[in-house]
Amino acid sequence: MTVRLALSVNGSRLNSSIAQLAQIGKLPGGGVSRVAFTKEDLLARKLVESWMREAGMTVRIDAAGNTIGRYPGLREGAALATGSHIDTVPTGGHFDGVLGVLAGIEVVRVLRENGLRLEHAIETIVFTDEESTVIGCKAMAGNTVNNPEYYRRSDGTSIQTCLAQIGGDWSKIAEAKRHPKEIAAFVELHVEQGGVLESTGDCIGVVKGIVGQYRLGVRVTGSPNHAGSTPMHARKDALVAASQMVLAVNKLAVETPGEQVATVGYLTVWPNATNTVPGKVEFKIDLRDLSETNLEQLLAKMKLEFQAIASATQTEIEITQLLHVQPTLAAPKIQNAIVEVCQELGFSYRHLISRAGHDAQEIGRFTDMGMIFVASRGGISHAEDEYTSPEQCTQGANALLQTFLKLDRLYAAKGDRFIELQGIIKM
Amino acid sequence: MTVRLALSVNGSRLNSSIAQLAQIGKLPGGGVSRVAFTKEDLLARKLVESWMREAGMTVRIDAAGNTIGRYPGLREGAALATGSHIDTVPTGGHFDGVLGVLAGIEVVRVLRENGLRLEHAIETIVFTDEESTVIGCKAMAGNTVNNPEYYRRSDGTSIQTCLAQIGGDWSKIAEAKRHPKEIAAFVELHVEQGGVLESTGDCIGVVKGIVGQYRLGVRVTGSPNHAGSTPMHARKDALVAASQMVLAVNKLAVETPGEQVATVGYLTVWPNATNTVPGKVEFKIDLRDLSETNLEQLLAKMKLEFQAIASATQTEIEITQLLHVQPTLAAPKIQNAIVEVCQELGFSYRHLISRAGHDAQEIGRFTDMGMIFVASRGGISHAEDEYTSPEQCTQGANALLQTFLKLDRLYAAKGDRFIELQGIIKM
């Protein structure tokens, strides 16, 4: 035990790597713009690849352009994997994704400078284009869409060209698929991108799972009439109907027991003229929860209520499903390992739900998945002022390191028997 | 009585004038585009002026560009006036405004070809720019805004230039003001622009008054947060708050006894992104009724409810008054005269409210006002398919003619005494 806990990451080295990566795509406001497949993304990939090699990892790029660094284990067989992404939204920060990738490299640096190998190989993965198509993790889970047009960039560039630029190959995308026999468990360290840890003051978030999501488009059609000359009783006011629906969505999310969230974030009125009774309203619903069953029940209730509202307001509705992402639960075994690590390291912790998507969501579809969160100041992410302190980054990386050491035993124990910590005292 | 009722307008001449005017600014879809101060508006004004002169009227153009045709009476003093406008919305129809002007000319044509004069002079007026600034009728009521910038066209043209083009003079706008001593009564014939007469099958609408109007701008400010990671209880959702307000506006208008109408026709959401809790919503309220007291009470209740909603949703509101137009009641004496005329002519009729604004609304602020409505097919106006049948136009013009004959006695009776119909059998 002492040996294991004595190991810890080099926080200053980790934070210096984070700062160095933030120079690529640096924005005047202090943030970073490193959209996938841009010159900046390519430069950053090269830098990270060189860090992987320096840390003693072999590096390969799969057909989806995922950069996979591998630090060999004592045994052949499945690896323990970590990683995240280094691409950003057009105006992003220093930490989203980057922390998970660089902590994964730092874990290997520490093992190597201490002359240690685990029973399992360790893979640190840079997933391709997490911020838009999530093609990297999707390909690894075998869930890409079999149509290159789906992945065409908004500037017109084909996915074939994009992947070729980073060493991938669209024609071989199916070969990027991985299996539980290759990755026994995947743990991703990430900034929370929400305000729970900051508000509770806890050091580590033990993620219970990543929410599933439905996105619906709703069109309400009434009659556009003169706001002056149309008596109240003769109206088919699409905005009055839509307002009732917005409130129904909110009420369902607030009053149903559970942690679901439902939002109408987008709404437009037609013709949107002060003196015209609205003839048409279009709005979009974003619905998220960890329970697919709960999501389905909420959707069914929503549709029933919408029908009743449309009927009462003499309007017509049309509902289109725009998106459906299944929730992914974190493996209880990994959650427990993270909890034990926190207890051993004296880190306060809290179980929470990830309400944003992550690469781990796809990886969790074929193998055991877990996530470690550290706080985001003000809950802010996808913005230039995204911030997690150097100390918090170091704490997250130490939790990741210790979780790997613990999982090395837990997953090894599946097959053969090992003496505790056998792995890390060999070599 | 027989003599009076024997007089009637020449329907085919009236409808042929309407069709001829519709050639100026004719649109491919069959409608008309004759926006005030455009080449088409100027051409139409010239044509109408020539028709006035042919009908035996003297014509002058006042400082506001109003074209005033005058058919002398047997006595000096106040005239009986009628008229409306010939400018249209950018995509308008053949009848809105035009019917009132051309029926006013037709009334004079009939009198003249029968060798008749009334005791009162008759004025038929083309008011300037009814569809936008209503500067013509406003100037006649002495209610223009004393700032030329207020009247600048969206293409940048100054009101000075606009008025000069049509024979007006901004620097003398105050001289356009008229007095009850000059206009004893004003009666405007107009298409209903609503669906009441069509639905009841009545021939003539006897207008009780023109509604007053308040227009309010409301800004609701919440907090724009991530739709995934912000728990329901931590939200300040501006759209949830605004939806409650939209429904409160509707409920007040529906449930308060009376004929008021209230509409939220314009609403925008910011940032209007599916995955962001709305941070700001702006909407506009259009509120109309014939009773200013009722309007004020409704406004006061609305503001109270908005405050309560803002407080309950943790949002902030800002309310701005964008417009206030006082209601104008039609003179009971004129309403009664129109009713008697309908009874005598065998026209079915119905008292109704004008919920759209008209030139008569301003003229009614300084002298007795009345309005005669004829049906609009489908209640449609301000559109290319605006339609009132030739028969209905003729019925409206005959009601106007007979009303003038009746008012000539009624208003004359104020001062001197006259034998019934003395006016029209002289000359």
Image (cartoon, coloured by chain):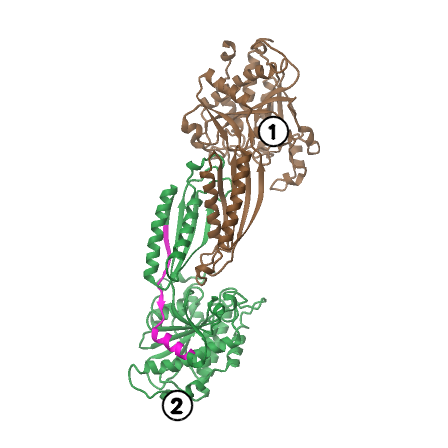
Chain colours: A green, B brown
Residue that numbered label 1 is attached to: B365
Q: Residue at x 60, y 15 (%)?
A: B412
Q: Are marks 1 and 2 on the same chain?
A: no
The x, y position of residue B58, in whole percent, is 64, 20
Q: Which residues are magenta?
A: A319-342
Q: Is residue A427 above or below residue A193?
A: below
Quarter of the picture holding the C terminus of chain B: top right
Q: Nearer the viewer, mark 1 or mark 2?
A: 1
Is residue B271 visible in the rendered structure shown here? no
What amino acid is at disc 2? Ile
The vertical placement of A133 against B246, above or below, is below
Name the image quarter holding residue B68.
top right
Residue that appears at 35% across and 47% down = A307
Q: In this orientation, which residue lies closer to the viewer: A113 or A68?
A: A113
Q: Is residue A214 above or below residue B305?
A: below
Q: Is residue A339 magenta?
A: yes
